[in-house]
Image (cartoon, rainbow, N blue to C red):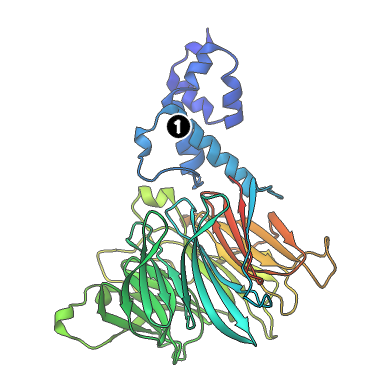
Amino acid sequence: MNTVALPLEIFLHIFLYLSIEDILALRQTCKDFQAMTQSRSVWSLLYQTYVLEQDIPTPQISNERPIESMAAHDLEGMTIRSLRLRNKWTSAFPLAARKTTIMSQPTTDGNHLPRVIGLHLLPGHGARWLISVHALHIGGQVVVFTVRNWDLLANPPIQTSCLTSHAFSGLAINAQAEQPFVLAVQRPHLEIYSMDAEGILELEKTFPDHRRRLLAFAGSTVVFTANNNGSLGIMNVDDPATEASLFNPANPQPDECHSVFVHADFLMALRGKTFEIYDLFIFRNADPELGEPQRTLEAVACHKWQWRLDSGCLVPQVSHSAARHNSLPPIYILARFGSWFPWPVNILHHIQLAPNPAYNNSLVVSQTNLPYIMPPAIIQTIASPIRLFSITHMVLGQYGSAVWIDTHTEDYYAPDCGQRLAGYCLKHVPDDSDIGASEIQQTTVASTMFDLNEQDTWVRLAIDEAEGRLVTGHSNGKITIYDYA
């Protein structure tokens, strides 16, 4: 019997046992296999199986074009690009296809360089726009803060907008890319910006209040800490009268808040001592005509960390399975705990929050109706040595990529100098593993080393996994862009 005469459905099952390289090699054997491996049904299945179901990002894809309308060669190209980038991104020593440097301009006397204190790649724009924040120190004091928008599509990158101020207390990028507002800046008043097609930042709203430090921006909601006592607050920029404060009875003396996630129904706060969940029903359904005073929202759930959190970030993950079932995605936390000494530990912790299958989103969030299983579970620990008083920073992507700066460079430089730019792809633990009841811990080391720096100048990071872009900010104001796609 001629093997090629088998029905296409049989080959679709067979192809799932082959790698993409095997299928492309099979194409070269005969005209029948060439035609078969160029069919849309084959590449639709392969893209669904090897990319979407594995939660692997696709570079250079337009969100405006549905996958159902794509031809076979488009699906083939997307599948190959996605897997090629993922393999490079997670390899031991990935080689950047391009490495670009944006130099900082010194002061007129040539004696001072601004320091990078913030880096953000705008979501939803193909990693094209980079927001940088520089602080110029003279005589031990900050003289001026500068917020710039860079167009990374240009070669070399060009500056499209620049905001300067002598007062600055925070910047937050809108986590919802489809919203018209892209940026919130506190300098010293709260300012909300949109961006046109040329990358020009345009001021849309101003709220005269200098008592805040910005933490997060999602949709029309901003989250901030009060400068006087560190307590959390939340405000709707479309209706500032609905401002509310967040209070945790289990932690009446607020400490530093490292990261915040804002959902339509709830808010999560990653603090130094606690992890907190707040219900936002009252805040979302406020009636401005009632003229009610500022509201106080109490935490409905709280987990106290065994050790103080030195630094951390909290990011909901892209989950094809969750989207298909219209459920909440898993949430990852990347954290470095403190110690009894004035320096943090040499270990990073991957902590996971699994969606609660019993959660009913038609009811308010409460102790008996939590969206996620509590407490958060430590999945694994990652070795990340840092020297005394050295600078470290970490970022966490929506597809599980953890990237950080540490000082594990003894094999390359002297023991007292050098920085390492390392990474690890965090593994998802299925929801049915009951991680809320018991912690699953395993120790590992960084699987990827992106670069080394002998000068100890790296201070900030930004990543876009979907486009394979990694950005480092330096203490001398320089910005380095690594492109792996």
Quarter of the figure with residue 199 = bottom left
**Which residue is painted at 65% across and 52% down in the image?**
99
Amino acid bearing label 1: Asp
Quarter of the figure with residue 386 = bottom right
Q: Left or right: 247 with respect to 273?
A: left
Q: Which residue of the protein is positioned furthest toward the front in this rendering?
A: 108
Number of marks in the rendered image: 1
Q: Does the image show residue 79?
A: yes
Q: Pointer 1: what residue? A: 74
| Front in this rendered view, residue 121 or 79 | 121
Q: Which residue of the protein is positioned furthest toward the right in this rendering?
A: 414
Give residue 408's position: percent from left, percent from top. 76, 65
| Front in this rendered view, residue 55 or 154 | 154
Q: Quadrant of the C terminus?
A: top right
**Which residue is painted at 70% across and 60% down in the image?**
445
Question: Is 27 located above or below residue 420 in the figure?
Answer: above
Question: Is 85 located above or below residue 331 in the figure?
Answer: above
- Could you say whether the residue bearing mark 1 is in a helix, strand or loop? helix
Give residue 111's position: percent from left, percent from top. 69, 77
